[in-house]
Structures are given as C-alpha cells and as structure tokens.
Amino acid sequence: MNQLVISAIGSDRPGIVNELSQLIVQNNGNIDDSRMTVLGGEFAIILLISATNQELDSIEQLLKQQASNLELSIITKQTSEQLLSEKKLNEKKIPYIVEVLAMDNPGIVYKLADFFSSREINIQSLQTDRYPAPHTGTQMFAIEMVIAVPQSIIINDLREEFLDLCDDMNLDASIEAPRL
C-alpha cells in the first residue's frame, strides 16, 4: 500500500475536515495519520493517507481540481509505507518528550532546533503556544516536542547539556522518556 501526504491551509471555517475526508473516502483512501490546527484565522492540516497507486493518483488530481472550491492551498507528495518502515528499523532511535516554558522572546525554537540537529537528533513533532501568564499578563511561550534520540547517545549527558543550554537561556525545561 502506498501513501500520500497532504498539506492544506486556508481560512478557518466549519466543514473543511468533512469535505477533505469525504473526498478521500469516496476515492477509497484511508486516513492513517493527521494533524490539524487553527493558527491565527487560518486552518492547517496535514494528512497521511493510504490507497493503491491508481487511487492516490486520482485523489491527487481531485485535490488539485477542488482546491479552489475548498478554498485551500494544497500540496501533496506520494511516499511509501515500506520505505518508512525500513527507515524506522535502521535508525534505532528512542523517543523522548521535551517540554520548555519561558517568557516569550525571539529565537527560542531556533536555538532548541539547532541544539538537537547539531547532535543528529530528529524532531518528530513540535508544538508551541504563546499565552499571557496569570496575574501578570507577561507573554509566556511553551514548547512540547518529541525527539528521536539515537541509541548511541548517552541520555544523561544529553539531558545535562540540554538543561545547561536552557539555564543559559533562562528556560524551564525537561527531557523525559514518554509515559506508558
């Protein structure tokens, strides 16, 4: 079974998920994984769907034809489930959850991403949120990410280096194994 990654963005309105999922299901596609959010007034969605090659080609064409009617900018890319599985087996990486909280200031995401990429650690997911602190109204910035740490890295050393960086940046942070 082959897969298609669909990325779409457009003005937020009721019915977007319904319309996209209907188009996919009516053309024998199956939604395997998805992320959806509203950023500002824009709705953003990323979907991973599976189907036969012919069905994926048909879904891609329909999405291109219907993008204007759906009021979405759509990008698609075909991938293969087999390739994804082979990569996962060869990488032998362990997931860890990173949480960071700080007063909002520019460059936090960049510095954290730079820290992990310089150590060949992949960021598998990243979510940020900006909000006013209770009582003071100070703009706070929260980050939650899942990273894939190669087995060759000693996690205690990584944690110590990461927390030193966060102390230098005045960030409250943790790096922990996922809770089961």
Image (cartoon, rainbow, N blue to C red):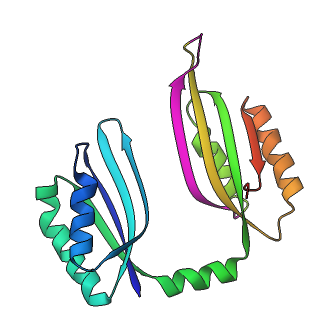
The image quadrant that residue 91 belongs to is: bottom right
Q: Is residue 130 visible?
A: yes
Q: Main secondary structure of the magenta part?
A: strand
Examine the rendered structure and indicate whether residue 37 appears above or below residue 66: above
Residue found at x 88% / y 54%: 157
What x and y, as percent, mark residue 68?
12, 57
What x and y, as percent, mark residue 13?
22, 43
Q: Is 44 positioned to the left or the right of 112 in the image?
A: left
Residue found at x 26% / y 71%: 24
Q: Is 38 positioned to the left or the right of 19 in the image?
A: right
What x and y, as percent, mark residue 74?
26, 61
Examine the rendered structure and indicate whether residue 139 appears above or below residue 61: above
Q: Magenta residues, as a range?
A: 120-136
Q: Quadrant of the N terminus?
A: bottom left
What x and y, as percent, mark residue 23?
21, 69
Q: Quadrant of the C terminus?
A: bottom right
The image quadrant that residue 64 belongs to is: bottom left
Is residue 124 on the magenta stretch? yes
Examine the rendered structure and indicate whether residue 4 appears above or below residue 55: above
Q: Is 129 positioned to the left or the right of 56 in the image?
A: right
Residue found at x 66% / y 33%: 101
Residue found at x 73% / y 76%: 92
- Residue at far top of view: 135
Tag count in the figure? 0
Q: Is residue 117 visible?
A: no
Is residue 37 on the magenta stretch? no
